[in-house]
Image: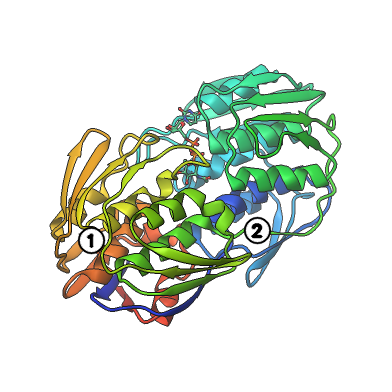
């Protein structure tokens, strides 16, 4: 198993190239199940979650050709409709194949994803919506068995809660359904917007893209002709490196980034005293030596993303005063707190609210990554900790960060990947 060794208190400088967004790539790869042609995708990040989904598609019979950050996926040979536990257990987002396979083949089996480190993360909203569209759903022996022999039918769906992969799944299911599907309380994340925009260009008319009400005109089973497309920049990776600049008081420029997707994150960094120079595809962070405390509530886009909560908690340890961070999306997403405390952070947890009293001196030690974004919070803390920090179980980090240690090394961090 790999771990990261980081020597802290180092200031950074230079440019970081932002990769394509993992959370945009996953639904867009699943979307290729709806295509009649080979689909070329550019700017895919090199992260384990993408490989996991491609492996799942290959197991189902599709062929995938990788060429650096680009890929061609051909699902015309797809001849299996069962996503088995061995893959789904490693990545919950495997559930994204349910909508497209069911709508194309009339049947699909997907292993129930089970619990995950950051909370229960049920899929009831996905299933309820598919039932509304005429699917028969049976849960047996740990599998969701879905059938719709006569195809799915358009209907009105109102999500009780905003769900990102739920919205993506139902949009894809609706793409080949008969008639019109309306989704109310849809997710508005840029990753969902890109999925809708590409479908909209590929023969599925979608109204309301980027709003909470999506209207999808299904093709009644007609497969789509999907042109080559480029994955949008990863806003969470970008936000993480902005925090790296802010926590080390270093000027950093991010390239291939879209500041429009980072509104809430930039606003909070500004509240903490940082400023920015922004162009259409770069952001330069001008840091402050005196970080101010911040109040954060995680909510659905365009509000502050839960996927940036852990990184801001690490950043808040270096702000002068009391910061309050409230997690509203996932009930168990504070596992990085105990590791940050071991490094010297003064954080009190009360249910889903963390109170951080800063500024505290952090010291390097051995810490354990517990989930994807928690891992990056530990990297941020290690960058300013005195001495050496060893971050174990970084397979979590590898699920979602493309070459994190190389990117940080290029801007001056002392960071090494080693074997346990
Ligand atoms: C996606 C992102 C993840 C991010 C999360 C919230 C991907 C691959 N992952 O995850 O990085 O942290 O959005 O922005 O894009 N819920 C239900 N029932 C359901 C579905 C969801 O109760 O059927 C609840 C969840 O438990 C959670 C909330 O709804 O409390 C939001 O979850 P959701 O948006 O579905 O998260 P994911 O799509 O899994």
x, y percentage for residue 202? 82, 46
**Badge 2: residue crowd in 10 Å (few <14, some 14–19, many ≥20):** many
Q: Is mark 1 within 8 Å of ligand 1?
A: no
Dot 2 corresponds to which residue? Answer: 231
Instruction: Work out whether mark 1 precedes mark 2 in sequence or the reverse, and give the earlier one.
Output: 2
Mark 2 element type: loop
Q: Nearer the viewer, residue 150 or 251?
A: 251
In the image, 197 versus 247, the foreground residue is: 247
**Res. 172 visible in picture:** yes
Q: Which mark is residue 318?
A: 1
391 or 342, which is in the foreground?
342
What residue sits 48% from the left and 42% below the top?
A: 92
Pointer 1 local density, CA inside 10 Å: few below 14, some 14–19, many at least 20: many
Tell me residue 100's x, y (percent).
69, 37
| Place of residue 135 in the rendered image (x, y in percent of width and height, measured from the top left) | 67, 21
Residue at screen point 17% across, 59% down: 359
At 81% from the left and 55% from the top, the residue drawn is 227
Q: Quadrant of the C terminus?
A: bottom left
Instruction: Answer with left or right where residue 242 lies relative to residue 302.
Output: left
Can residue 79 be seen here? The reply is no
Pointer 1 and pointer 2: residues touching (CB < 8 Å)? no
Q: Is residue 264 left or right of residue 373?
A: right
Q: CA distance from mark 1 to mark 2?
A: 34 Å
Left or right: 319 as drawn, with respect to 274: left
In the picture, the quarter occupied by the N terminus is bottom left
Place of residue 80 in the rendered image (x, y in percent of width and height, measured from the top left): 68, 42
Nearer the viewer's eye, disc 1 or disc 2? 1
């Amino acid at each position: 198993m790999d771990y990261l060794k980081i020597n802290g208190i180092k200031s950074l400088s230079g440019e970081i190239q932002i990769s394509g967004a993992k959370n945009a790539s996953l639904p867009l790869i699943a979307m290729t199940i709806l295509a009649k042609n080979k689909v070329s995708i550019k700017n895919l990040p090199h992260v384990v979650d993408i490989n996991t989904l491609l492996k799942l598609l290959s197991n189902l019979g599709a062929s995938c050709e990788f060429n650096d950050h680009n890929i061609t996926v051909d699902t015309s040979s797809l001849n299996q409709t069962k996503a088995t536990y061995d893959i789904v257990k490693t990545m919950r987002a495997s559930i994204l194949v349910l909508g497209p396979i069911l709508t194309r083949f009339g049947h699909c089996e997907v292993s129930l994803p089970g619990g995950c480190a950051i909370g229960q993360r049920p899929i009831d909203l996905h299933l309820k919506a598919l039932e509304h569209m005429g699917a028969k759903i049976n849960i047996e022996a740990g599998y969701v068995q879905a059938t719709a022999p006569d195809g799915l039918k358009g209907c009105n769906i109102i999500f009780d809660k905003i769900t990102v992969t739920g919205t993506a799944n139902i949009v894809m299911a609706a793409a080949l359904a008969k008639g019109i599907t309306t989704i109310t309380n849809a997710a508005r994340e840029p990753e969902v917007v890109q999925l809708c925009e590409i479908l909209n260009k590929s023969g599925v008319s979608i109204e309301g893209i980027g709003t909470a009400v999506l209207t999808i005109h299904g093709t009644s089973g007609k497969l789509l002709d999907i042109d080559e497309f480029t994955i949008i920049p990863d806003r969470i990776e970008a936000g993480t490196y902005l925090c790296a600049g802010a926590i080390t008081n270093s000027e950093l420029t991010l390239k291939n980034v879209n500041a429009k997707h980072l509104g809430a994150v930039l606003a909070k960094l500004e509240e903490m005293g940082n400023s920015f120079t922004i162009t259409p595809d770069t952001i330069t962070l001008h840091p402050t030596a005196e970080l101010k405390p911040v109040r954060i509530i995680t909510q659905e886009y365009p509000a502050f993303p839960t996927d940036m909560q852990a990184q801001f908690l690490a950043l808040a340890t270096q702000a002068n005063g009391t910061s309050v961070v409230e997690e509203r999306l996932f009930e168990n997403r504070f596992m990085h707190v105990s590791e940050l405390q071991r490094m010297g952070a003064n954080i009190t947890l009360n249910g889903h609210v963390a109170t951080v009293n800063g500024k505290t001196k952090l010291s390097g030690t051995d810490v354990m990554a517990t989930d994807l974004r928690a891992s990056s919070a530990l990297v941020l803390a290690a960058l300013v900790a005195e001495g050496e920090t060893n971050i174990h179980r970084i397979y979590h980090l590898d699920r979602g960060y493309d070459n994190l240690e190389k990117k940080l090394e290029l801007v001056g961090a002392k960071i090494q990947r080693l074997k346990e």
